[in-house]
Image: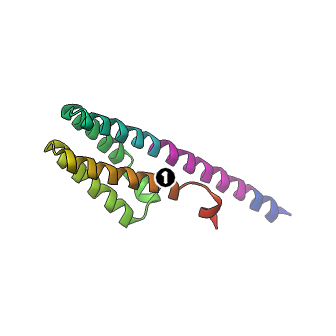
Amino acid sequence: MRSVIISVILFVVVSVGAFYCVAHNEEELTLLLDELCQMEDQIIAENWTGAQQTFSKIKEQWQDKSFYWRLIIDQETLTDIETNLLRTGAYTHAEDYAQSMAELSSLYAQYRQLLLQEALTFNNIF
């Protein structure tokens, strides 16, 4: 009987932890996606100073949570996202409209994919 109680308690603790991690991932990625949309609007309006400031904010938010992301995301995906971040920053600082928008859309797609990949859904469980 004691092992059943311990098993139930462990199951509850792990389940609550999983739900917390999923909610935290969703919140963080949604904030990053909102920032990317804001940056896109600034690039379209050719507000390069604002876009560069928004990019700095995005990069800072990503780096502040880098330890957490390294625990959650596989290394290949993490490397791809960080590479896209660097390219987006370089093109934004060079004020290259076409390349900035291309890298920004690629970064947006990666964040969306990560959001879907880390969500707690039936397809992700099985």
Q: Residue at x 21, y 51 (%)?
A: 99
Please, what secondary structure does the residue beneath circle 1 have?
helix
Q: Is residue 1 left or right of residue 104?
A: right
Residue 21: say if magenta. yes
Q: Circle 1 sits on which residue?
A: 115
114 or 106: nearer the viewer: 106
Q: Is residue 18 left or right of residue 109?
A: right
Do we see residue 57 in this rendering? no
User: Where residue 124 appears, x then y in whole percent?
Assistant: 59, 63
Mark count: 1
- Give the residue type that dot 1 points to: Leu
User: Where residue 104 appears, x then y in whole percent?
Assistant: 30, 48
Q: Where's the N terminus, which quadrant?
A: bottom right
Do we see residue 12 in this rendering? yes
User: What's drawn in magenta, residue-wise?
Assistant: 9-28
Q: Residue at x 42, y 64 (%)?
A: 74
Q: Is residue 39 above or below residue 126?
A: above
Residue 105: say if magenta. no
User: Where residue 54 appears, x then y in whole percent?
Assistant: 28, 36
Q: Residue at x 45, y 52 (%)?
A: 112
Q: Where's the C terminus, which quadrant?
A: bottom right
Q: Is residue 71 left or right of residue 6?
A: left
Q: Is residue 9 above or below residue 34?
A: below
Majority secondary structure of magenta residues: helix
Q: Residue at x 80, y 59 (%)?
A: 5
The residue carrying pointer 1 sits among few (fewer than 14), some (14 to 19) or many (20 or more) residues within 10 Å by Cα, namely some
Q: Quadrant of residue 53?
A: top left
Residue at the left extreme? Answer: 94
User: Where residue 92 appears, x then y in whole percent?
Assistant: 20, 43
Residue at the right extreme? Answer: 1
